[in-house]
Amino acid sequence: MVEQAVTARDEILARLRTALADDPPSVPVPRGYRRADDRCDLVAVLVDRLEDYRAAVHHGIDALPGLLATVDRLAVPTDVPAGWLAGYAGQVCRDAPPLSPAELDTTDAVLTGCAVAIADTGTIVLDAGATQGRRALTLVPDRHICVVRADQVVGLLPEALARLDARSPLTWISGPSATSDIELDRVEGVHGPRRLEVVLA
């Protein structure tokens, strides 16, 4: 007979079951979470949260040409809409075949869409779906320009989860990449793009 290895998780769960068997909870835990947002202007809430996170917000797809005019080398997913690149004179680096980390590092910015944006938390979620590309595409370049359509904005996390497939590689973005040391000095660009620019279409 072969003994199965016990993981730390198994051991913790076994201890919890033992402890609860002696004194089971007598009061049910309420699960009455809000699942829908009734605020009238979710886009305004999203903008407020994004700006609080130090992301730059631009209104209207017509803001794209001006943003891209400052970019010499632009990384894009293979299915980026042609209209997003209208008038762009720089070098377009399509991710097909997949760009290497070194190639991505030489680009000035990446342009993608998103799967959903959560107004309440100011979070943009990418799921490697249409107009988003693979995860490395949005993590290596120093600047991420992300187009968010108004119909992709939801109020609360449960609404976003209902639109996502948990089996997809999800990237959750709440402002530019940043971390703080023990003295709370903020350092940006450590784990991803230092600059996040959101274009609300």
Image: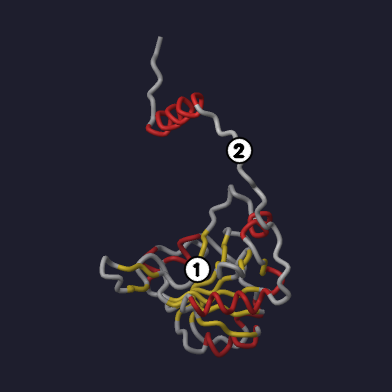
* Corner quadrant of residue 12: top left
Label 2: few (<14), some (14–19) or many (≥20) C-alpha neighbours in 10 Å: few
Of residues 98 and 153, the one nearer the viewer is 153
Of residues 45 and 102, the one nearer the viewer is 45
Which residue is label 2 attached to? 27
Of residues 98 and 158, the one nearer the viewer is 158
Mark 1–mark 2 contact, CB under 8 Å?
Answer: no
Report the amino acid beneath label 2.
Answer: Val
Determine the residue located farthest toward the top in the rendered image.
1
SS at mark 2 in the image:
loop
Task: Point out residue 25 in the picture as x, y percentages from the top left corner.
Answer: 56, 34
**Disc 1 or disc 2, which is closer to the eye?**
2
Label 1: few (<14), some (14–19) or many (≥20) C-alpha neighbours in 10 Å: many
Which residue is label 1 attached to? 174
User: What residue is at 51 percent from the left and 24 percent from the top?
Assistant: 21
Q: Is residue 163 above or below residue 200?
A: above
SS at mark 1 in the image:
loop
* Corner quadrant of residue 88: bottom right
Disc 1 from disc 2: Cα separation: 36 Å
